[in-house]
Image (tube, grey):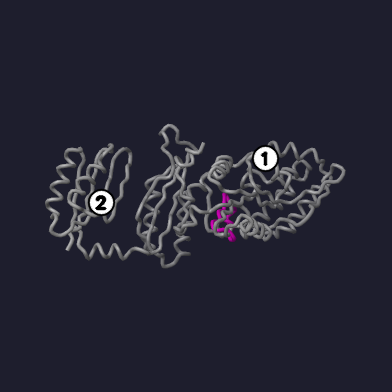
Amino acid sequence: MKDIVLINVFGDDKPGVTSSLAAELSGFGASILDIGQAVIHDDLALGMLVALEPGRATAETLQSAIRTRADALGVRVRFESIEHRRYQEWVDQQGKPRHIVTLLSRQVMAEQIAELTAVTVRHGLNIDHINRLSGRVPLDALDTHSSACVEFSVRGAPADTQALRADLMELSTRLEVDIAFQKDTPYRRNRRLVCFDMDSTLIEAEVIDELAKAAGVGDEVIAITEAAMRGELDFQQSFAKRLSLLKGLDESVLEGIARNLRLTEGAEKLIATLKKLGYKTAILSGGFEYFGRFLQQRLGVDYVYANELEIVDGKVTGQVSGTVVDGARKAQLLKQLAEREGITPEQVIAVGDGANDLPMLNAAGLGIAFRAKPLVKASAEHAISTLGLDAILYLLGFRDREHGDLS
């Protein structure tokens, strides 16, 4: 029977280590059953699981040759003989469900890693790989706008997915981090359309509240808006009530509000990167088309669907034209856009913060509650509250250096 040997190599990273060791193994006719390499702070960790043909070489002669080569390279080496039973158990793990667990924070702390990995173990998941997706940040550059992300590839099927998600949500709330748990499927990097809510998602404001302030009815409208976003009021009824309070507002106010809208952290970077990667983007908003078109020009968004504010003789009438874009309409538009782009809803990402975004988030392959109200965050499959909108790129598996190279 073939000898199976696990070779672990450690030391300073330098060119030629893998090449030199592989060349030594080739002289023994070794086959590579598994291989992995990581470099952490210029320190190399290389692992190779090899099988030797009977009669051609023994594990002892192989180890002696590899040790000599490792000494010449200035690296350390460790060997372990693997029983055939243990190897077969490893092979049998193939095909088990895989998931991706993503930890998002301003700065990754040991406590976060310890508690997150404890949760995965408790739910029967085994970690195969750990990768840092965020870039290298100098110590003196860590601040409230830093981004840190660690991705875990885990194997296994949790006995109770809802219980696992509940534990992850409790952990994210207590440690003030974001944790995403998603199936590792081919769709992850094959999504082609991203649909955004506008107010309090792409921009740091509710436009209807800004219009209300200009009309002198700010407090009344803001109270109705907050109740609607929490899911306490029906969207269409609350929308009609808020609109009616804007009657008589001068049309000239709109341009000033549009020019003063603040983009949400990471919005510009995210959309620019998505465009370079070939994604299509859309604004599906219960707000107003005027402001959606303004953002479309500024950011280069492909599609805009929102409510058309009715204006007569230069004054807001307190009505909208056409079909009101509520939660159900957003979900419908998402499906229509997917069909138009020749993709499935599974290939769509939806991002929003309010209760009227939930149908859209549920219709998409990846629904993300962004800095959302508690009800929405609890109901959505994924949530980002700690970082900016560009953290969505981490959920897609992109490293900072990958989209940085696109600039």
Determine if the magenta segment contains residue 364. Answer: yes
Task: Tell me if residue 308 comes above or below residue 123 in the rendering.
Answer: above
Instruction: Please name the amino acid that badge 1 sits on.
Output: Gln
Where residue 98 appears, x then y in whole percent? 40, 60
Along the viewing direction, whichever of 250 and 77 lies nearer the viewer? 77
The reply to whether the C-beta atoms of the residues labelled 1 and 2 are less than 8 Å apart is no
- Helix, strand or loop at disc 1? helix
Circle 1 is placed at which residue position?
A: 297
Which quarter of the figure has residue 93?
bottom left
Q: Which residue is mark 2?
A: 48
Part of the protein shown in magenta:
362-376
Mark linked to residue 389: none
Amino acid type indicated by mark 2: Met
Gap between marks 1 and 2, in whole Å?
Answer: 52 Å
* Few, some or many residues within 10 Å of mark 2 (<14, 14–19, 20+): many
Work out whether residue 254 can be spotted: yes
Picture layout, residue 392 above or below residue 121: above
Q: Is residue 92 magenta?
A: no
